[in-house]
Amino acid sequence: MKQYLLDFYQRLGIHEDMAENVEVITHSLMVIVLSFAIWLLSRRILRVIFSKVSVKTKSIFDDLLIKNKIPETLSYFPSLFLLISLFPSTMRSLPIMEQMGMTLLNVMGAILTIVLVRRLLNTIKDFLKTLNNFKDKPIDSYIQVIMIFVWFIGIMVIFSFLSGRDISTFMATLGALSAVILLIFKDTLLGFVASIQVTINDTVRIGDWISMNSYNADGDVIEINLSTVKVQNFDHTITSIPTYKLVSDSFINWRGMSESGGRRIKRALLIRVSSIAFVDEEHLNRLEKIERIAPYITQRKAEIEAENRANGTDKSLLLNGRNMTNIGLFRRYALAYLQNHPEVNKNLTVMVRQLPPSSEGVPLEVYVFIKDKVWVNYEHIMSDIFDHLLAALPYFDLECFEYASNPSVSFPKKKK
């Protein structure tokens, strides 16, 4: 072909040296046009093949190959191989151009290979995320680690092509600079190790609700990659936490609550000490009308009267002998109310307990688990429970503690 073009241009009367240059240009244009045509043909053929295969198969892997542009990437390789095979013969008379062109083509081949591997890894990542066993795993971290090695090798190969030196020379140089490399990629290496630890120990999964006060993070984990863990807070802001911090620092993972039978309520009513008193006969008769604790009052009343009679207790003073208190009866009422509440999980702890008194009163703590763990529903149920308990306090002659708006004014004590 080369000789035919030279003879053709010489017959046209073009000088031999000029004919040789024109032949190189013509030959190069023909190779470029042919390569472009092969690229167009390859792209169309690969698109058709991948589309037909994706339609006939049930797996979504081939659909993800198309989504990540694998056919388009593969379509460049036939043209590239053609250019690499024909370019030396085209530029044989121009050795400098031949060397520069082959270097450029080899670099393009290395870059295309890196792009192809990256898109294949993204396809694998997307496919694994569709599987139930891998949905909550930090797949991004492992893909990023592999891509670091791919880019590392690719860059070494590119430098080897550009400099004309063997790749082992660059590897030896990098070995000497290993300390610097470790310093540069410190966070990456820490993140990789942390990702492995998080996966093996099952510390955090994608979708977990975590709280990390040091980073103001309180929400759902939406992504775990090599360098960061992304948390979507409940106000829809995104907090990025370094992955290795999940190993070195403390945080709360609420997965146990989500997988359990209920979401805990642990909240106290502060009862004013001055409102706590023994229950006299008149008040007790009124309380016996409350259906939830009427059986308890009747039974307890009989037990106390029998013991006081047996001991010959002087009941002219209410303090003598055994007695019931309004806070004790309210505690029993609150427990009965919770045990009959349809949203309280009776298989888990149901308790109303008294905590040590403080300057703000006597805390009466409700400790139960709500069946509905959805945050909005949980808050509504908890509010309803405490609405009822707060409204029930006056029936027991109890009052909640509250600060006076004027410090010089004190609340009056309950009259006996």
Image (tube, rainbow, N blue to C red):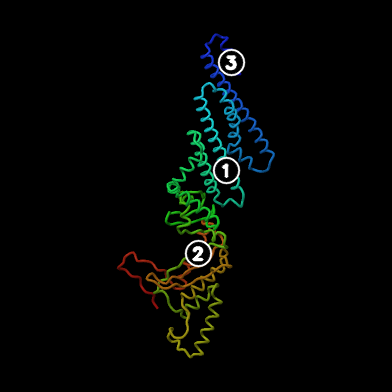
Badge 3: few (under 14), some or many (20 or more) residues near its Cα, within 10 Å?
some
Q: Quadrant of residue 340?
A: bottom right
The residue singled out by tag 2 in the image is 265
* Amino acid on which the number 2 mark rests in the picture: Ile
Nearer to the camera, 365 or 325: 365
First in residue order: circle 1 vs circle 2: 1
First in residue order: circle 3 vs circle 2: 3
Question: Does 32 appear above or below 352?
Answer: above
Q: Can you see residue 26? A: yes
The residue singled out by tag 3 in the image is 5
SS at badge 1: helix
Which circle marks residue 121 in the picture? 1
Q: Nearer the viewer, mark 3 or mark 2?
A: 3
SS at badge 2: strand
First in residue order: circle 1 vs circle 3: 3
Where is residue 399? Give x, y as percent.
42, 70
Residue lying at 58% horizontally and 41% vertically, measured from the top left: 120
Q: Quadrant of residue 125?
A: top right
* Amino acid on which the number 3 mark rests in the picture: Leu
Nearer to the camera, 388 or 115: 115
Question: Does 74 appear above or below 14?
Answer: below
